[in-house]
């Protein structure tokens, strides 16, 4: 049998318990103005009717392939898609999201105009903001050293909003399946380093029109309920990996590294709040678990770095002095008021910090 020609783009969709959303996701992909793609639906052992839905789509459209595996998680399903992909480029889509009809056209044209660059695009968290018309905004270039700024500004980090070189991925860049959280971010930094190392002079290329709708409805929950007990350990591994990539390759400006370090400390602080307020666990056990995180080598190094460089975070002194009550209080601010409430307290504390340390770096 003659092997079909390789498509330009492979779209990988991990599928698990998405029976209610999968049809609209697939329909948005099959409605693309760019026809030269394959759609890989990776049924990750879903216990509902998703497997049959995947097979049905594959029977009705020759661009669709359905792959089935035992349940291994999103990273496992994405890795299966990477291995099976035949396209020159690859992108990921979550099964409960949908995309602009012009997404693949815009991504392929940007990749063709700027070969070797890392193409990625804006996304919307409201469906009404999804860009559905022709693309008129040109891609915006960013240097590799600006990777930290792109991450902190929420432009970079979600793998469903970027285009990858399939051959480079298949040489050994896969998702770390031992990470339950933050695997996207760790994967993106590792891929970017490999791409820019292989192709010196390459840049990021950002498509500013929101071409992807991230449906966050019902996915968020309270801080004390939605984080598993190993949240802090997992995110410490992710941030340590990012900082190592920066030291060894990206060399981002200090202000950008400061922003990542601040986000690292805040993320661990939120995780500690979740540990300290975990329902159904004795208070002594919760406090012991929190102290164990604060005494771990990564968090000890992180805390020491803040004091060595005179960086500010509301969590810095509580981390250093193991003030669990203060960590719980700061987490409660964010639980009640969200990130805006956190930053209201942040600015008050920073004003005091700046008076005590006039030469300290500017706030994040």
Image: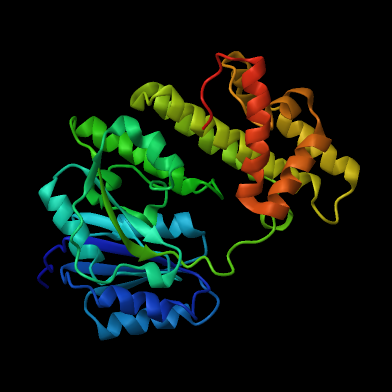
Colour convention of the picture: rainbow
Task: From this view, report whether residue 341 is shown above or below residue 3.
Answer: above
- Is residue 142 toward the left or the right of residue 126 in the image? left
Quarter of the view holding residue 104: bottom left
**Eyeballing the image, is 212 above or below 304?**
below
Q: Residue at x 44, y 78 (%)?
A: 51
In the shown orientation, is residue 316 left or right of residue 137? right
Looking at the image, residue 199 lies above or below residue 362: below
Q: Quadrant of residue 76?
A: bottom left
Query: Measuring 84% from the left and 38% from the top, which residue is drawn there?
Result: 287
> Where is the N terminus found, in terms of image quarters?
bottom left
Res 263 seen here: yes
Residue 64, position in %: x, y?
27, 74
Q: Exactly how many numbered labels are in the figure?
A: 0
Drawn side of residue 37 relative to residue 255, left or right: left
Closest to the observer: 121 or 227? 121
Q: For the point 25% across and 62% down, which residue is it?
A: 10
Whether residue 233 is visible, yes or no, is no
Q: Please state the horizontal and vertical placement of residue 266, each as a whole percent of the image.
A: 62, 38
Asked whether 57 or 295 is in front, the reply is 295
261 up-or-down from 177: above or below:
above
The one nearer the camera, 69 or 141, is: 141
Frontmost residue, 195 versus 304: 304
């Amino acid at each position: 049998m003659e092997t079909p020609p390789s498509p330009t783009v492979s779209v990988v969709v991990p599928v698990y318990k998405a029976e209610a959303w999968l049809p609209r996701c697939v329909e948005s992909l099959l409605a693309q103005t760019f026809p030269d793609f394959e759609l890989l639906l990776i049924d990750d052992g879903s216990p509902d009717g998703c497997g049959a839905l995947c097979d049905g789509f594959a029977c009705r459209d020759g661009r669709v392939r359905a792959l089935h595996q035992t349940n291994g998680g999103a990273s496992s399903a994405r890795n299966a898609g990477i291995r099976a992909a035949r396209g020159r480029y690859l992108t990921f889509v979550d099964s409960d999201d949908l995309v602009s009809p012009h997404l693949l056209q815009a991504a392929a044209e940007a990749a063709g105009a700027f070969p070797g660059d890392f193409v990625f695009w804006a996304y919307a968290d409201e469906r009404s903001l999804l860009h559905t018309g022709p693309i008129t905004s040109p891609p915006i270039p960013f240097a590799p050293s600006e990777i930290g700024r792109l991450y902190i500004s929420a432009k970079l980090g979600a793998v469903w909003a970027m285009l990858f070189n399939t051959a480079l991925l298949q040489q050994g860049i896969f998702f770390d399946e031992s990470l339950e959280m933050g695997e996207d971010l760790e994967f993106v930094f590792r891929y970017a380093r490999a791409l820019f190392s292989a192709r010196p002079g390459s840049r990021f290329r950002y498509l500013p029109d929101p071409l992807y709708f991230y449906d966050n409805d019902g996915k968020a929950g309270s801080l004390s309920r939605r984080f598993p007990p190993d949240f802090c350990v997992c995110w410490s591994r992710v941030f340590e990996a990012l900082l190592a990539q920066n030291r060894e390759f990206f060399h981002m400006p200090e202000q950008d590294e400061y922003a990542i370090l601040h986000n690292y400390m805040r993320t661990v602080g939120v995780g500690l709040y979740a540990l300290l307020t975990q329902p159904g666990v004795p208070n002594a056990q919760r406090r012991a678990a929190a102290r164990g995180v604060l005494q771990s080598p990564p968090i000890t190094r992180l805390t020491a770095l803040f004091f060595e460089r005179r960086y500010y975070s509301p969590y810095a002194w509580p981390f250093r002095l193991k003030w669990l009550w203060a960590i719980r209080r700061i987490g409660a601010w964010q639980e009640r008021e969200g990130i805006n409430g956190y930053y209201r307290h942040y600015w008050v504390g920073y004003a005091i910090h700046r008076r005590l340390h006039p030469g300290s770096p500017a706030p994040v």
